[in-house]
Image: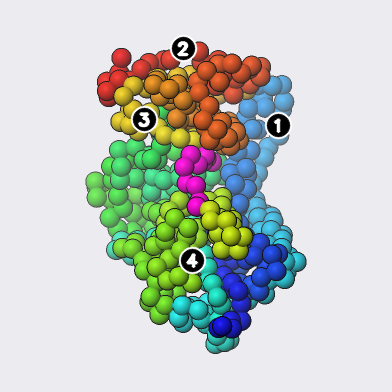
Amino acid sequence: MTSYDYDLFVIGGGSGGVRSARVAASLGKRVGIAEEYRYGGTCVIRGCVPKKLFVCASQFPEHFEDSAGFGWTVGESSFDWKKLVAAKDKEIERLEGLYRKGLENAKAEIFNSRAELVDAHTVKLVQTGKTVTAERIVIAVGGTPNPHVSLPGHELTISSNEAFDLQELPSSILIAGGGYIAVEFANIFHGLGVETTLIYRGKEILSRFDNDMRQGLHAAMVEKGIRIILEDVIHEVKEDEAGGLVAHTKQGHSLNVGQVMLALGRDPNTQGLGLENAGVAINDRGAIIVDEYSRTNVPSIFALGDVTDRVQLTPVAIHEAMCFIETEFKNNPTKPDHHLIATAVFSQPEIGTVGISEEEAAAKFEEIEVYRAQFRPMKATLSGRSEKTIMKLIVNAADRKVVGAHILGHEAGEMAQLLGIILKAGCTKDDFDATMAVHPTASEELVTMYSPSYRIKNGERI
């Protein structure tokens, strides 16, 4: 019998990697884990956690304005970018410490080093040159922002990685992209007082979301003062004479800004990982190809999270890690379930969504019912803000099952989490109708939309 240094070696200290290493170690397995940067991965260090903190910071100007309608008088306010960055760094340091402590308590061996594959059972720790062997290897190295190297002047731009640690807050910024990262950062920078422009090649932002959510958020962003340019792309970025940047677009715009941020998608972080040494197969995007159990084509090597380019969400990576543990160490073969994943866009207002859009449902089912409510949230009645909340339920008419739920408004992400449970349980519209409302709340609209706003049959609205 072959003897290995470890039962499991994990490459990558993000959410999926740490979870698989910690739980395997807690089961008594000999586990090693290597991370070249900081434990916590994209989400904790330079992703969803600092982003949400920045979202909170950027909302205060509106809170100050809204308070006047409720009788408050707020004095002159000012914002200190460096203080926010320092507070964010302190919180990230705390969270990274918790990740490390969890691994240490489980008796996993931690390596602060880049790790690369030598063969199907061997890993090289680049910092020391040492090689170790493992019966199983998990690759959970995540993704990295697409640098868009074909763009002339791309080296003058930043990605979401650098946006959290700018030395100074720019007076103006141009953000390229129409996905959730671009949209969220556009709202963040605008809320912090930066003149913000978003440029996107598509006809509308957030291409994979329900059209009402896309159009409603677009209108809200423009009303706030964010400029949105559609069906156009940056052609070139240059430095201008004033020390700023000028971005030229294919449609003939010349935009002088203090900073240009590219949010043009994320690529699997597989370059230089030594996959070819072990014979691990990748697709044309560089993502590691896995089966339903997160196995690669090499029996001893597995891959989890964004590096597989299945669903790029932190909870998904954690779920895949737990399924790996069940399958490999508990003799309970378990496939990750990527169906009905609730998600949120932390824009302002937020989007919370689970299930399929109206457009997808109309193409999938013979007949659907659409329940839609649009209203002014209660807070806005006194603040004077003209924002609107939109709520939608998409129902398959054949069995009355709710197949999609979409919300644009305050705390939409929180509501989406609960709706995710409801849709996962297979609830019908009749279950919604039988549920008592909590009044006065925005979410009560979800259980008081008794009649469909319209129906779609065979692709035609009736």
Q: Which of the two residues, 156 or 348, is positioned nearer the viewer here?
A: 348
Q: Do the residues labelled 4 and 2 touch (CB within 8 Å)?
A: no
Label 4 and label 1: CA atoms lie apart by 55 Å
What numbered label is drawn on residue 302? Answer: 4
* Disc 4 to disc 3, C-alpha distance: 34 Å
Which SS class for mark 4? Answer: strand
Q: Which label sits in the foreground, 3 or 1?
A: 3
- Between the residue at mark 3 and the residue at mark 2, the CA separation in whole angstroms equals 18 Å
* Amino acid identity at mark 4: Phe
Amino acid, disc 2: Ser
Q: Residue at x 39, y 45 (%)?
A: 178
**Where 196 sits versus 110, above or below?**
above
SS at mark 2?
A: loop
- Image depth: mark 4 or mark 3 in front: 4
- Image check: 251 left or right of 268? left
Q: Is residue 321 visible?
A: no
Q: On the image, numbered disc 1 is attached to which residue?
A: 74
**Where's residue 318, x and y in %?**
57, 54
- The amino acid pointed to by label 3 is Ala
Q: In which quarter of the image is the N terminus?
A: bottom right
User: Along the polypeptide, which appears first: circle 3 or circle 2?
Assistant: 3
Magenta region: 335-350
Establish if 164 lies above or below 2: above
Q: In this view, does 203 lie to the left or right of 383?
A: left
Q: Main secondary structure of the magenta part?
A: loop
Q: Do the residues labelled 3 and 1 touch (CB within 8 Å)?
A: no
Tell me the CA gap for discs 3 and 1. 47 Å
275 displayed left or right of 29: left
Tell me the tag on residue 451. 2
Which quadrant of the structure image shows residue 164?
bottom right
Q: Check disc 3 and report the residue beneath it.
A: 361
Dot 2 or dot 1: first in sequence order is 1
